[in-house]
Amino acid sequence: MNSIGHFVSNEHWPGTSGRLGDVINPATGEAVSRVTLATKEDVDTVIGIAAKAAPGWAATPPAKRAAVMFNFRDLLKRHIEELAVMLSAEHGKTIPDAKGEIARGIEVVEFVCGVPQLLKGEYSEAVGQNVDSFSVRQPVGVIAGITPFNFPAMVPLWMYPVALATGNAFILKPSEKDPSVVMRIAELLAEAGLPEGVFNVVNGDKEAVDTLLDSPLIDAVSFVGSTTIGEYIYQRGTAAGKRVQALCGAKNHMVILPDADMEQVTDALIGSAYGSAGERCMAISVAVPVGEGTADRLIEALTPRIRALKVAPYTDPSSELGPVISKQSYDKIHDYIDQGINKGANLVVDGRGVELQGYENGYFIGGCLFDNVTTDMTIYREEIFGPVLSVVRAESYDQAVDMINDHEYGNGTAIFTRDGDAARDFWSRVKIGMVGVNVPIPVPVAYHSFGGWKRSLFGDHHLHGMEGVRFCTRLKTMTTRWPSGIRTGAEFNFTAGKDA
């Protein structure tokens, strides 16, 4: 069976650990490879390598760092088919979904190709008599990234291209559930011309995470995952004096007003609630139709569409819904469905009991739809992270807005309406980090920034865009005055050669 180690100084490294974990194909429930789980000593070794490489990379001109990013972008585009198959084989999502994920990661690489422009400082002349002041942004040093299983390519690509382009070294600790695509992308980054030691991948579990959080050589930590783990990482990392951003759980609502185009709403919910088997922090998991008539029309339109979803492994080109990532997730989702039924919610579409010939041990769950869910139910309050949509009927628009604002999570939300006044009032009033108007998954483009509010985010900075640049750099401001002296004579030529 194939064994996956680490990627350090632009080459594969087995490490010294004898601990291994299985990488499972979720469509079959069978182990397809084994991944090495790093010891504290392994992680400390890699941290030392990154810390040694960081000063030289920070001193590299931004234009030269951008050139590496241009090469990296081209390699990602050239290998997207290969990467998508590799990703789907371990995660289970469909090939089109995997390719879309990689494409969104490439957008961030393209954004940071403009890093010389992004790092331009400010200059103020004559703030005092013969005194000038200017500011620059400099890299923080060594940044660690801890990323989840649900987007094994995209989420890391939302982190390290920004960190690398701004002059930092980076250590990535990806999910041990689907590590192969990360390792292949690391090879492409080395091929793009990144110096040794600047980017490294360490596979591991809590031991690796805690070592990164505690090491005095790690300056900042970026995390995406569950709220429980994110809060732990934020508290432990900041206690160790690090800058930390932790993007966490979600319970995203879609408000449907009576004037909404129900066909458009239905299409939007099918994709946003059931795409990637609902394993997205930006998935719509709560639909909030305003008025009983709107709710009845929504249920009538959604029900046949959900029942018709094609559940199949990624190897089937017609697949619309692949398996969830693990037996643990499979069992957890089933438990939530049971809780919803026991609390009185109406399970209109039951996606349990999916059986596929040849994949009897896979973790497949069909689309599920609950109606008449109330805000005191566990299936409403907690993130299920599976293909389960809850419909909570609201009597009024104001009740729908209050529902969203009262929830502990504040990642994303959307409203579907033809009324511009209602839409503007909605995005102005909701206490949510990312808002869509007739857009079901309002993930910002790469040159804007991704992040939520409330318990969906710990820390002050969002991912990628200018917020990402600010997280990966520190502001330094200089105030200068020079004594008068003998001025040199004129020069009439540019500096030539290697010093240009």
Image (tube, rainbow, N blue to C red):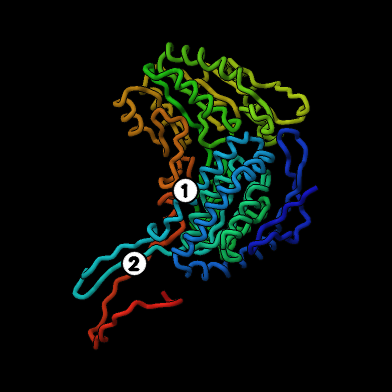
| Image location (x, y in percent) of residue 470 | 42, 55
Which residue reaches farthest right?
1
In the image, taking residue 31 as reference, residue 296 lies left or right, namely left
Identify the amino acid type marked 2: Thr
Mark yes or no: residue 384 visible.
Answer: no
Residue name at image x 78 percent, y 28 percent: 358
Mark 2 — residue? 477
Q: Percent from the top left, x then y, of residue 103? A: 53, 43
Q: Quadrant of the C terminus?
A: bottom left
Decide which of 344, 487 is in the foreground and name it.
Answer: 487
Q: Residue at x 55, y 47 (%)?
A: 77
Q: Is residue 326 left or right of residue 243?
A: right
- Give the CA distance from mark 2 to mark 1: 24 Å
**Residue 463, numbered circle:** 1
Of 43 and 366, the residue lying toward us? 366
Name the residue located 76 percent from the left edge and 53 percent from the top edge: 19
- Position of residue 227 in the picture relative to residue 132 (left or right): right
